[in-house]
Amino acid sequence: MSPQILSEFRLKKEQLKEVMKRMMREMDRGLRVETHKESSVKMLPTYVYSTPEGSEVGDFLALDLGGTNFRVMLVKVGEDEERGWKVETKHQMYSIPEDAMTGTAEMVSVQHSGNQPPLSPATNPTPNSNPVFSSQGILLNWTKGFKASGAEGNNVVGLLRDAIKRRGDFEMDVVAMVNDTVATMISCYYEDRSCEVGMIVGTGCNACYMEEMRTVELVEGEEGRMCVNTEWGAFGANGELEEFRLEYDRVVDETSLNTGQQL
């Protein structure tokens, strides 16, 4: 690639600071009740009120539907005398057929033994009695080239449970519905107790962090903290990045399945 083309991608320090200021503004708008719907950065409450405290032991099957691959992970969490926790993972990866990405939610769940927690597309967890995780979540919208019908607006945990019943050849209880950023933050916490941010840099980019409850206006309560899923990959949907976008950005966007999203 020529130096001239590469130079177009470089932002000056002042420009980066302006992007940062605009993102901070959208994050603040996402946290507030009166501006949440209009904000491009939704700052979704996860109902994860705390980082791990030691009772999370056992075998967990984690399903992650990414942009190009479907990962199935067996996570063993046990006690370790030296570190307090010991985490071991085994995983297998499968390619996602294009007809599953653009077909129906049932096709996704049949071909891959279920939808997913952790869920990569934007989901909005809903509260339940468990103080650490939510066991249900509504799929707000697909991203990363997915366009499968019958999933948006529905509880994906219910879809997963239905898919398990249809198969009928194994039993599994869905105990947690967490975004992949939240799962990343929690898994890193086992190694470093100061970890309070999770970030994904893959087909998409997103982050979560522990926020003070008094600023999370979408959830009642002032005390304590909650993990917030920023969904910052949607930043720019309100035109915040127009002056920084190049012709290449526009061509990629115009030829994508979800035009105008995840800029």
Image (cartoon, grey):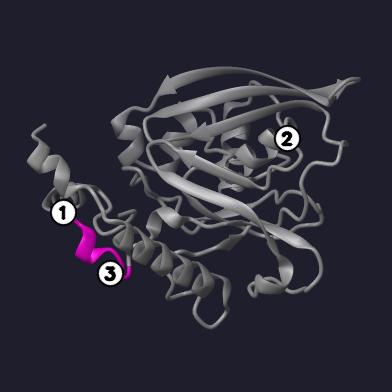
Residue that appears at 35% across and 66% down: 18
Label 3 neighbourhood size at 10 Å, few (<14), some (14-19), many (20+)? Answer: few
CA separation in Å, label 3 and label 2? 38 Å
Which residues are the magenta region? 238-246
Q: Amino acid at mark 2?
A: Asp
Does 155 sit left or right of 252 as displayed?
A: right
Label 1 SS: loop
Outermost residue toward the right?
81
Residue that appears at 69% across and 24% down: 75
Label 2 SS: loop
Residue that appears at 59% across and 39% down: 117
Which residue lies under the disc numbered 3? 239
CA separation in Å, label 1 and label 2? 39 Å
107 magenta-colored: no
Which residue lies under the disc numbered 1? 246
User: Which one is in front, 108 or 132?
Assistant: 132
Q: Is residue 255 visible?
A: no
Q: Report the predominant secondary structure element of the magenta stretch.
A: loop
Residue that appears at 52% across and 38% down: 115
